Amino acid sequence: MNRYSVINRCLLALLMLLAGRAWAYTYTCEPKSGTPTNLAGDFGTVTISDPTQNTAGQTFDAAASWNTGKKIPVRCDTPNSASGRRFTATSPLPVSSNDGTRTWYRVNEYLDTAIKINANGLRYIPFKNLYTASGNDSNGGTQMSAGSSGVIDLKIVRPFVGTTSFDNIHVADVFLSHKSGVYSPNPIAEVYLNGIISVPQNCTVNAGTIISVDLGTVYASDFKAPGEKPANYTPKSFSFPIQCNYGASLANLTLRVDGTASADNSNALQSNNPDVGVIVTDDSGTILAPNNLNSALPLQLNQVDEDNYSTTVTLEAYPVNTTGKPPAEGTFTTLALLRVDFA
């Protein structure tokens, strides 16, 4: 073998390598910027005017829609020619049920939703590898509208009082690829929704204003066993009015506490001091554990006039040590929401 044949073989191997490289496309797509486009939609307020529809299992088809008007810049690992676009859409929300036509996702303790996004027409998610049209997306110069608009169906899981809401809830992820059976690892867009759902039955706590409770001064040395009141501490009592309209007054109502619970004591609200929580009780000392549907105070309403009923509620609050560690000195605060619910 002479040196010329060796060189020729090296050239042949190099050409074969280059030829193989030309076909090594993944046919996956990514956001052009490297970050999924944020499609933040606001569907406004959905008003359920009939109080008899505020019942578990009631569904509302095409209850609300959104249209962000945004486009999604993409870049795909494909040859520099047109090929079929295939969209996939999923939801990060937990699946609640499937009725054979649509998948219902859990929004909160009151609502499920089924989501349609616009991908060459409105389609329920999830869907996979949906062919829409052909295009050349290899150079990063194209933009998509899939997911920028859509429609939601709603289902009441638990009747509620007043309003419940979508608070910038991440409802969908949109993916793009250019080959059947190929799925891109990262979404080109994420869909977030905001909006309010309102029902006729309504109650107002403390006329809608903040209730501030001063828990006083407590020495760090007074905190003993986790979950117990500080030594010689008297719980702070506070009272507030609740007013309900006629529709709400016809039902059995309860009051409960929502907020950030302590990771170390589920009965306590976590304060900004990592070792201190706050426990809220009724006036007999029964704990109202945060975010617990079964830990609620029954309400007894008195008729004010033809349309309104009211009552005054007294609760108590006290700080507790949640970790067993001596709390750092300084002011601590916590925040809670008092929620009126149907029993």
Image (spheres, helix red, strand yellow):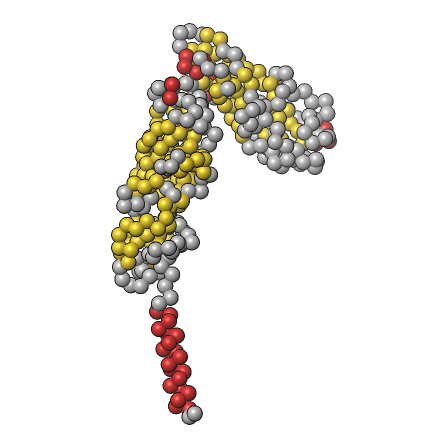
- Outermost residue toward the bottom? 2
Residue 184 occupies quadrant: bottom left
Against 186, is 3 above or below?
below
Q: 5 or 307: nearer the eye?
A: 5
Against 27, is 158 above or below?
above
- Residue drawn at x 40%, y 22% is 54
Q: Is residue 170 left or right of residue 234?
A: left
Against 318, is 183 above or below?
below
Q: 56 or 310: nearer the eye?
A: 56
Q: Position of residue 329 (x, y in %)?
A: 66, 34
Against 114, is 56 above or below?
above
Q: Is residue 170 left or right of residue 268?
A: left
Residue 22 occupies quadrant: bottom left
Q: Quadrant of the N terminus?
A: bottom left
- Outermost residue toward the front? 100
Q: Position of residue 189 (x, y in %)?
A: 37, 47
- Residue drawn at x 38%, y 37% is 100
Q: 327 or 203: nearer the eye?
A: 203
Q: Position of residue 294 (x, y in %)?
A: 56, 24
Task: Say if residue 214 shows up in the picture.
Answer: no
Task: Say if residue 154 shows up in the picture.
Answer: yes
Q: Position of residue 199 (x, y in %)?
A: 39, 22
- Residue drawn at x 34%, y 57% is 179
Q: Is residue 171 left or right of residue 319?
A: left
- Residue drawn at x 38%, y 31% is 154
